[in-house]
Amino acid sequence: MQNRRDFLRQASFLLAGGMVAPHLLTSCGGKTTAVSTKNIGLQLYSLREMVKDDGIQAVLETVAKMGYKNLETADYNNGKVYGLAPSEFKKIVTDLGMKCTSAHLSQTYTKETEAEVMAWWDKAIDTHNEIGVKYIVQPWMPITAEKNTLDDVKLYCDYFTSVGYKTAAASIAFGYHNHAFEFEKIGDQLIYDYMLDTVSANHVFFELDVYWCIVGGGDPVKYIREHPSQFKTIHIKDEKEIGASGQIDFQPIFEQMKANNVKDWYVEVEEYTNNDPVASVQESFDYLNKAEYVY
């Protein structure tokens, strides 16, 4: 299988030579496949090491060649996204035929730091409003079942609701992305269920990471079915490449997503079978592109 640099070199050569027809793309494995008409998104954290090594421009070009349509970012710092002004980042993405529809960013919160944290969010919201995202998602919170109480969880739920009011003023929805610990209990209360019931449902949605939900003992189909208004985006994730573990049945998940009219979902790949992130992200795209149930 080609490594990342070989793939980029070959793709650049073919494009420069006019050898790729408009309706075709070249994959990591050297295959030529039809460009997908499916709405396949990618969380850019999947290529975090390539961002460090080659820069965000090369990453975005690679992702566009693969056929991904929508992007979710995982880098924000002081008004810039991946080190770029929001207008510059948006132009690169748009020129490559993609959209940046969602962003992961977060701040820890205490009552004592409330003014500072909310000022940080004001600037972050302005930045991402310029990019044109539909969603801003906090990907984590510092809560554990062993060390925290439900009052601590409520503090974060109220905090998320306050941020949700701010993003709503910019016509952006604010959400929370889970890992596995939210499916543990504090006392007799499941943390995730408590969060679903405690946030303002009009101002905080949930981005369900189906892999971490399953690892935590939850049923993603059941959650999506029973809370149709609270799940606006989904992370399609597996242990490594999508479909590689053979342990997750993605079809009923996609069927329920479609029934709920979930329009935005993102592939996330955190671990790689052959230590080749680009190949893993391409393999994930190919798996979903071939699946009849994927929309």
Image (tube, rainbow, N blue to C red):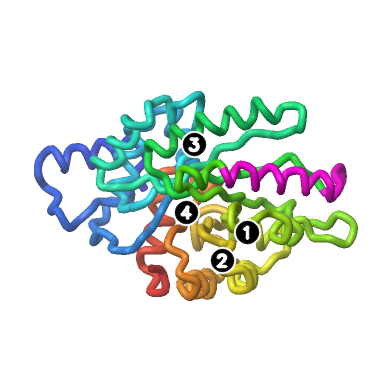
Q: Is residue 291 magenta?
A: no
**Which mark's residue is nearer the viewer, 4 or 1?**
1
Q: Which residue is mark 1?
A: 201
Q: Which residue is mark 2?
A: 229
Q: Earlier in the sequence, mark 3 or mark 1?
A: 3
Marks 4 and 2 close (CB-CB < 8 Å): no
Q: Amino acid at mark 4?
A: Val
Q: Which residue is mark 4?
A: 267
Marks 1 and 2 close (CB-CB < 8 Å): yes
Whole-angstrom CA distance, mark 2 to mark 3, is: 23 Å
Q: Earlier in the sequence, mark 1 or mark 2?
A: 1
**Which mark's residue is nearer the viewer, 4 or 2?**
2
Whole-angstrom CA distance, mark 3 to mark 4, is: 24 Å
Whole-angstrom CA distance, mark 4 to mark 2, is: 21 Å
Q: Which residue is mark 3?
A: 125
User: Residue 156 lies in what quarter of the image?
Assistant: top right
Q: Earlier in the sequence, mark 3 or mark 4?
A: 3
Q: Determine the residue positioned at 84% across, 50% down.
A: 150
Residue 117 position within the rendered picture, expressed as x and y whole percent measured from the top left: 64, 30
Q: Amino acid at mark 3?
A: Ile
**Which mark's residue is nearer the viewer, 3 or 4?**
3
Q: Earlier in the sequence, mark 4 or mark 2?
A: 2
Q: Is residue 151 magenta?
A: yes
Whole-angstrom CA distance, mark 1 to mark 2, is: 8 Å
Whole-angstrom CA distance, mark 3 to mark 1, is: 20 Å
Marks 3 and 1 close (CB-CB < 8 Å): no
Magenta stretch secondary structure, dominant: helix
